[in-house]
């Protein structure tokens, strides 16, 4: 199972950041060709991302490219650069319905075929940035076997809803977070929480991380490398959780050896969901 | 591909480069490279620039590079962007860009 706690945004036209970001070791790096790039630099950024994707340093880390919407003059060109460059994942912004994922999927398959590559190795994810997107999240999440996740993008969503961030317990995002998370889980894909805009506010960032973690998000979109370590530490399991996970897996192994379907540990049943949770705990511990 | 107008791509920020292209005045390909690391990496930069131009079939024009310590992949991308802008080319041949 691929660990995706941190997805770091990197502006696609920033050569310096593209040349160094891999050293920060986020779980995924997202090269942005959309909002971070001005219209007059879209062509140059597209080539920069295409070349960076082929750099040896980016073969060891999951790469995501946020393209422009397909109904813009940039979207299809961005997609060509992303797929031909070998991006692991293409992120579609402002997704509002499943048909947009179907269209994206068809174009990706066409480009893979044109490159002579086996179809299916380019994965997809959708960003949900509007009320329509939230309402249709279930269909969007299940729109393609290539889908690996959906993300809630807070700023555009809140503008669409006619409100803004209020801090604290963030009731303004509660429904969207819950809806996106349920859609992701029903489709067995990952869910990513909103980016936190104030990179100097560690306290606010960690408060939001705690909400996302408690709700069950796999991770967050990040806008600055300094947020990576904070996030990874917050997602790291405690020693008590690690010890318990090891005991769960040992009990499961013993049950398997004895040919038993289930086994109990400390009076509680160890079944597949418990085993899966223990594996995730150990994976997060190892990566922290 | 023929450079038919002046164009630039890139920046003078660290790890980037600025590429200026212009139509040839003498039918030749003139490449000028300025770099803070010319002593250590001058030959490598020249090789990447020449290779990129060859793939784009650029045989004439004036190419001025001001390098600020860019990686090879950045050099390739900025040279490509400047040439494509200078050629007024909207369509991309991805084989030439690989």
Image (cartoon, helix red, strand yellow):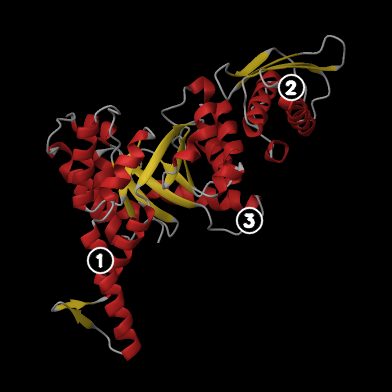
Neighbor class of circle 2 (other Cα within 10 Å; few <14, some 14-19, many 20+) is few
Q: Give the residue drawn at x 41%, y 28%.
A: A35
Query: Which picture quadrant has residue A46?
Result: top right
Neighbor class of circle 3 (other Cα within 10 Å; few <14, some 14-19, many 20+) is few
Chain ID, mark 2: B
Looking at the rendered image, the disc whose residue lies closer to the viewer, 1 or 3, is 1
Q: Which mark is residue A4?
A: none
Mark yes or no: residue A70 visible: no
Above or below residue B27? Residue A116 is below
Q: Which mark is residue B39?
A: 2
Above or below residue B75? Residue A251 is below
Say which element carries label 1. Answer: helix
- The residue to which callout 3 is attached is A117
Mark yes or no: residue A34 visible: yes
Query: Which percent across, then down, holds residue A160?
Result: 23, 32
Q: Are labels 2 and 3 on one chain?
A: no
Chain ID, mark 1: A
Q: Residue furthest top?
A: B25
Q: Name the image quarter holding the C terminus of chain B.
A: top right
Report the Cα–Cα distance between label 1 and label 3.
Answer: 44 Å
Q: Give the residue drawn at x 30%, y 38%.
A: A153
Residue placed most toward the observer, A69 or B6: B6
Above or below residue B75? Residue A208 is below
- The residue to which callout 1 is attached is A243
Q: Which badge, 1 or 3, comes first in the chain's sequence?
A: 3
Q: Give the residue drawn at x 37%, y 46%.
A: A126
Query: Which picture quadrant has residue A29?
Result: top left
Asked whether disc 2 touches disc 1, contact meaning CB atoms under 8 Å apart, the reply is no
Report the Cα–Cα distance between label 2 and label 1.
Answer: 56 Å
Drawn side of residue A111 relative to residue A140, left or right: right
């Amino acid at each position: 199972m691929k660990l995706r706690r941190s997805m770091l945004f990197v502006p696609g036209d920033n050569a310096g950041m593209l040349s160094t970001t891999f050293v920060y070791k986020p779980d995924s790096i997202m090269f942005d060709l959309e909002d971070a790039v001005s219209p007059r630099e879209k062509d140059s950024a597209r080539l920069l991302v295409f070349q960076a994707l082929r750099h040896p340093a980016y073969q060891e880390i999951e790469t995501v490219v946020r393209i422009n919407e397909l109904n813009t003059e940039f979207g299809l060109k961005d997609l060509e650069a992303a797929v031909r460059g070998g991006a692991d994942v293409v992120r579609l912004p402002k997704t509002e319905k499943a048909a947009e994922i179907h269209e994206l999927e068809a174009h990706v398959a066409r480009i893979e075929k044109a490159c002579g590559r086996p179809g299916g190795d380019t994965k997809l994810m959708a960003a949900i940035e509007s009320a329509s997107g939230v309402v249709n999240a279930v269909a969007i999440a299940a729109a393609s076997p290539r889908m690996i996740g959906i993300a809630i993008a807070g700023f555009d969503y809140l503008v669409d809803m006619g409100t803004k961030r209020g801090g604290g317990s963030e009731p303004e995002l509660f429904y969207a977070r819950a809806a996106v998370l349920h859609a992701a889980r029903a489709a067995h894909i990952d869910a990513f929480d909103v980016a936190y805009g104030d990179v100097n506010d560690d306290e606010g960032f960690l408060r939001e991380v705690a909400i996302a973690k408690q709700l069950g998000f796999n991770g967050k979109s990040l806008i600055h490398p300094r947020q990576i370590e904070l996030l990874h530490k917050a997602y790291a399991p405690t020693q008590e959780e690690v010890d318990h996970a090891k005991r769960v897996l040992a009990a499961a192994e013993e049950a398997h050896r004895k040919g038993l379907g289930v086994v109990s540990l400390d009076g509680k049943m160890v079944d597949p969901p418990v085993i899966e949770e223990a594996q995730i705990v150990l994976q997060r511990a190892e990566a922290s | 591909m023929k450079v038919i107008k002046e164009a630039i791509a890139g920046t003078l920020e660290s790890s980037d480069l600025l590429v200026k292209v212009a139509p040839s005045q003498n039918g030749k390909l003139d490449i000028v490279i300025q770099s803070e690391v010319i002593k250590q990496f001058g030959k490598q930069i020249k090789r990447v620039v020449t290779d990129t131009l060859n793939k784009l079939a650029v045989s004439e024009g004036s190419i001025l590079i001001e390098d600020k310590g860019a990686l090879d992949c950045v050099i390739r991308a900025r040279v490509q962007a400047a040439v494509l802008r200078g050629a007024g080319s909207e369509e991309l041949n991805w084989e030439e860009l690989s």
